[in-house]
Image: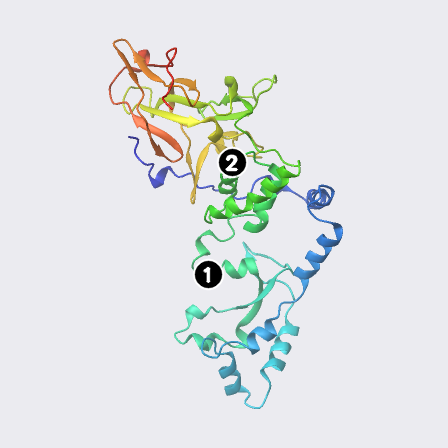
Amino acid sequence: MARKPSEEEELAPDAHGLYDATWQDAEWMAMVERLVADGFVTWKEAAATLLGELNPPQVGTQIASSDAGTFGFKANHRSAFPDESLMSHVLEWFYAESGRCVHEVEGKKCGTRLDLQADHINGRENFSDKAAADTLDNLTLRCRRHNVAKRKSHILNANRTLLPAQQALMWILIEIQPRTKVDFGRLCRIYGMTMASVRFDEAWAMAIWREREGRYQIAALTDRYDLVIWPDNAITRRYTSVEPAPVGAQILAPDVHGDGILCFVASPDVGMANLRYYECDVAKIPFIYPLDSRPTTDIAIWPTAKGGVPMPPRGLQLHTWALRRPNQEIYWSAPGLQRRAPVPKTVNGLKVTGLGRRATVSDLSLTIPEGAVKEA
């Protein structure tokens, strides 16, 4: 059985975002126009949503009505101004603010007016008596994203993405249009998102809804595909085409059934040590997408919370391969050896088993004998 990849093998992205990082106002304007043209929203809905986000937050109400058992705003105000209204002081503080997020990232202020929240300048966690932090002169305005980014639970992964996760999920779906839910997860991890994958599952609903309207294409098992192999042995796919292979790649197998299974033997080096037999559903092989300055094969991962694990045979020596259908059996074959391949165990999305020293690399092959059909 293949060992589980170590944490050192995780491919956490070192740059965040995709080609949206190079977009200027013209590209963002074009996207909004496309959202309207494609029926996602009307101009009225787009404007109304923006107006709602611009509406100043109800911080006065929240502070003035805060739970006295949890926050110290009321007690601190009574101590300093026993005969004056807390709400009037809150509004005085509120009106004196700039109305923009004051958070700085690498010396540059955020400055947005959208979705603002009251936030502590010196966090409550820095006070032995947390209620002592709850004074108006210790408050400022930050947008929701940068307010959340200060939390201990988020600080390690804060600002990893160009867009906040909620918006980035839709940017990937609408702009890049991944063909499978697995590819959507891969792109989200490459983008830099670290949240639970259930968020991707939920966002994928938009692709399903759009496909039902005839406005999105999700890959189907009944479709046919070309398998494309790259210099690092990463394997991707595209819909069957007469076009040549992408620059730097080769067609590994043309016109493959969407319900097919790619079976292959690979190892970490050219020798016969650590030979492993893999099975990968064609439906799990990633498509080719525009990744801007990133290598095309960055998509060949099994997505994880830290980024992704390279998807074999990417980065491995590929020794032999074959394609089978779900109802076919496959055999390991070599001089003096022919045995049915055992049922592998699933590791990081692929089925894997070790071969030990059953055969040398030079004479090992995978075969599907005529009539080798799996029992129902």
Residue 90 to residue 183: above or below: below
Estimate the spatial distance between the alpha carbons at disc 2 and disc 1, rounded to whole Å. Answer: 30 Å
Q: Which mark is residue 57?
A: none
* Three-letter code, disc 1: Arg
Callout 1 crowding tier (Cα within 10 Å): few <14, some 14–19, many ≥20: few
Residue at 61%, 80% (x, y): give it: 87
Left or right: where 104 falls relative to 351: right
Q: How many marks?
A: 2
Which residue is nearer to you in this view: 271 or 66? 66
Quarter of the rendering containing residue 220: top right
Q: Is residue 249 visible?
A: no
Image quadrant containing the C terminus: top left
Residue 49, position as x, y percentages in the image: 68, 56
Q: What residue sits right under mark 2 in the picture? A: 183
* Residue 349, above or below 154: above
Q: Residue at the spot x=59%, y=49% of the render?
A: 167
Specify which label sits upstream in the sequence, 2 or 1. Answer: 1
Residue that carries the numbered disc 1 in the rendered image: 151
Side of 223 relative to 48 (left or right): left
Query: In which quadrant of the rendered image does the N terminus lie?
Result: top left
Question: Quarter-wise, where is residue 278 in the image?
Answer: top left
Between 35 and 74, the one lying in front of the other is 35
Q: Are marks 2 and 1 in contact (CB under 8 Å)?
A: no
Disc 2 secondary structure class: helix
Q: Residue at x 61, y 42 (%)?
A: 209
What kind of residue is marked 2?
Asp
Q: Nearer the viewer, residue 83 or 349?
A: 349
Residue 91 at x, y percent in the picture: 64, 77
Using the image, determine if residue 59 lies above or below residue 285: below
Q: Tag 1, which secondary structure? A: loop
Q: Residues within 10 Å of mark 2 (few under 14, many from 20)?
A: many
